[in-house]
Amino acid sequence: QVQLRESGPGLVKPSQTLFLTCSVSGDSIASDYHYWSWIRQSPGKGLEWIGYISPEGRAYYNPSLKGRVDISLETSKNQFSLRLSSVTAADTAVYYCARHWSGYNDYWGQGTLVTVSS
Amino acid sequence: QSVLTQPPSASGTPGQRVTISCSGRSSNIGSNTVNWYQQFPGTAPKLLIYSNNQRPTGVPDRFSGSKSGTSASLAISGLQSEDEGDYYCATWDDSLVEVFGGGTKLTVL
């Protein structure tokens, strides 16, 4: 059974960098078939795709985040991570990691709430 | 404001058939497949329908999806109380961005 779990600070100060890790079990992030996504959901609102990364380490991002985002693989730990710089209150959200295959996200982590506040 | 347009709410009584619409453009729904996610309060979204009309293993056949042109629909037949939750459509835009609808809150009366 594939499982994903997000981890990281629940509180980040404005202008600082948000850093989250997604630990994957039941699948290898270095496999040829799946990409690995980050998606967020602001309180009481809809879903926003942040980006994803291929097993070779090629990352694709939502242009709306204007160069603030970086997704990387840590294959030795079977983890992938998200960095979002220069955060503001608008970045307060539940952040989900997910496994992506052929256009859809088939397994999701439980999500982690990140609040941006001083 | 979401790229894909869904009604904010839908409702039905147990046993009824309910449909949820999802409207987009030629650059997203018009040229890519549509997926649907189900979400209950405090939990992560769950894949409900993929590639317009395919159900993952374990999803009851009461749930079905369709797509025509720049719109898609999710139908739930034999509505049950446990179906109450939020439903999101999703697809890809030609600019290689995954886009979502704003979500529809389904209430079982």
Image: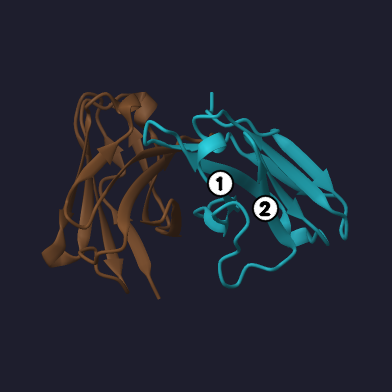
Name the residue located 20 percent from the left edge and 30 percent from the top edge: A85
Residue sitting nearer the eye, A98 or B21: B21
Respond whether the residues carrying marks 2 and 1 are from the same subunit. Answer: yes
Say whether residue B56 is visible: yes
Q: Earlier in the sequence, mark 2 or mark 1?
A: 1
Does residue A21 sit above or below B28 in this rendering? below
Label 1 is found on which chain of the structure?
B
Identity, as a three-letter code, of the amino acid under mark 1: Val
Q: Which mark is residue A27?
A: none
**As shown in the figure, which amino acid type bears the numbered disc 2?**
Gly
- The residue tagged with tag 1: helix, strand or loop? loop
The chain containing the residue under callout 2 comes to B
Observer-nearest residue: A14 or A111?
Answer: A111
Residue under numbered circle 1:
B34
Q: Residues within 10 Å of mark 1 (few under 14, many from 20)?
A: many
Is the residue marked by circle 2 packed among few (<14), some (14-19), or many (20+) residues within 10 Å?
A: many
In-front residue for pair B91/A86: B91
B44 sits left or right of A100 in the view: right
Q: Quadrant of the N terminus of chain B?
A: top right
Q: Decide if residue A57 is on the left or right side of residue A111.
A: left
- Residue B65, numbered circle: 2
Q: Dividing the picture into quarters, in which one does residue A117 lie?
A: top left
CB contact under 8 Å: marks 2 and 1: yes
Instruction: Give the chain letter for brown.
Output: A
Colour cyan maps to chain:
B
Q: Is residue A118 left or right of residue B58?
A: left
